């Protein structure tokens, strides 16, 4: 429901912008596509391919300024763009020929800043990311076609930071990793499709370091061991599905000794 309301609001914005632009062009028909003495484009402008007008907007010294509207060949709105003297500054929308929004971008002085969204069939959201001055910053969420969350992650200054989770289409957590400025840090979990833990790993600045464990699908421990600076160390034990010990290996500096 929220998505439908948002689409209606944005559609109204597009209509108002297009109407305002058309009104201005009709009111100043004799000044359309004006070149000054320096051959700079000035004022209202229509971009044409023969008799087909595929874009309308304004130029200031040959720089796009204000709202520009780009059209499909059926005259429906294809892009709504916001410019400030040749620099992207504000909302940029892309629509399909049926009028559904397929993408939304927000810019500040030429850099992505704020939410970026990608929409699929009938306006269903597929991806939502947040930017700050051109870099990923904040929550990023990717969706399945059924609109359930596929992946969610936190970013800081363009790098994963905090918890990232991946989900099955049924909504179970498939994996949960922790990051510190782009590096795996702490305990990482990988799960079976039903959500049962399959593997636990421990990282220190993207290097395996600490406890390691694998589990059978029934939840019973399968492998238990330790890593030191990326290498297996100490005693590693393997178990069958009933929890019975079936093997032991000692590791020293990554080398095994049975």
Image (cartoon, rainbow, N blue to C red):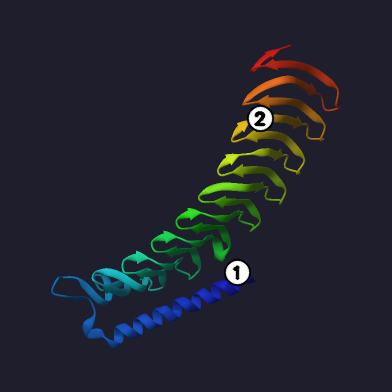
- Asked if residue 165 lies left or right of residue 44, the reply is right
Q: Residue at label 1? A: 3
Circle number at residue 51:
none
258 or 71: nearer the eye? 258
Q: Residue at x 42, y 59 (%)?
A: 111
Q: Residue at x 26, y 86 (%)?
A: 28
199 or 167: nearer the eye? 199
Helix, strand or loop status at disc 2: loop
Circle number at residue 209:
2
Residue 16 picture location, percent across and down: 44, 81
Relative to 231, is 136 above or below? below
Relative to 122, is 255 above or below? above
Relative to 221, is 152 above or below? below
Residue count near mark 1 (Cα–Cα under 10 Å), binned few <14, some 14–19, many ≥20: few
Please identify the quarter of the rendering in which residue 141 is found. Answer: bottom right
Q: Residue at x 74, y 30 (%)?
A: 213
Residue 206 picture location, percent across and down: 59, 35
Please identify the quarter of the rendering in which residue 144 is found. Answer: bottom right
Distance, label 1 to label 2, CA atoms, is 44 Å
Q: Residue furthest bottom?
A: 27
Helix, strand or loop status at disc 1: helix
Quadrant (top left, top right, bottom left, bottom right) of the N terminus: bottom right
Total numbered badges shown on the rendered structure: 2
- Asked if residue 223 lies left or right of residue 80, the reply is right
Quadrant (top left, top right, bottom left, bottom right) of the C terminus: top right
């Amino acid at each position: 429901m929220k998505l439908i309301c948002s689409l209606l609001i944005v559609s109204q914005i597009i209509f108002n912008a297009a109407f305002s632009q058309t009104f201005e062009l009709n009111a100043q028909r004799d000044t359309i596509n004006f070149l000054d003495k320096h051959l700079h484009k000035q004022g209202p402008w229509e971009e044409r391919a023969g008799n087909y007008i595929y874009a309308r907007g304004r130029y200031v010294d040959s720089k796009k300024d204000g709202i520009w509207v780009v059209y499909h060949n059926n005259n429906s709105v294809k892009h709504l763009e916001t410019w400030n003297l040749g620099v992207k500054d504000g909302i940029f929308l892309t629509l399909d020929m049926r009028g559904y929004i397929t993408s939304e971008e927000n810019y500040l002085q030429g850099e992505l800043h704020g939410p970026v969204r990608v929409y699929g069939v009938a306006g269903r959201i597929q991806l939502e990311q947040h930017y700050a001055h051109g870099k990923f910053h904040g929550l990023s969420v990717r969706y399945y076609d059924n609109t359930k969350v596929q992946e969610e992650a936190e970013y800081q200054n363009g790098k994963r930071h905090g918890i990232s989770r991946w989900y099955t289409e049924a909504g179970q957590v498939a994996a949960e990793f922790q990051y510190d400025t782009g590096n795996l840090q702490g305990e990482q979990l990988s799960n079976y499709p039903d959500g049962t833990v399959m593997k636990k790993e421990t990282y220190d600045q993207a290097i395996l370091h600490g406890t390691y464990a694998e589990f059978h699908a029934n939840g019973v421990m399968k492998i238990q061991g330790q890593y030191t600076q990326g290498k297996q160390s100490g005693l590693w034990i393997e178990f069958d599905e009933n929890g019975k010990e079936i093997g032991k290996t000692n590791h020293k500096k990554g080398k095994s000794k049975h």
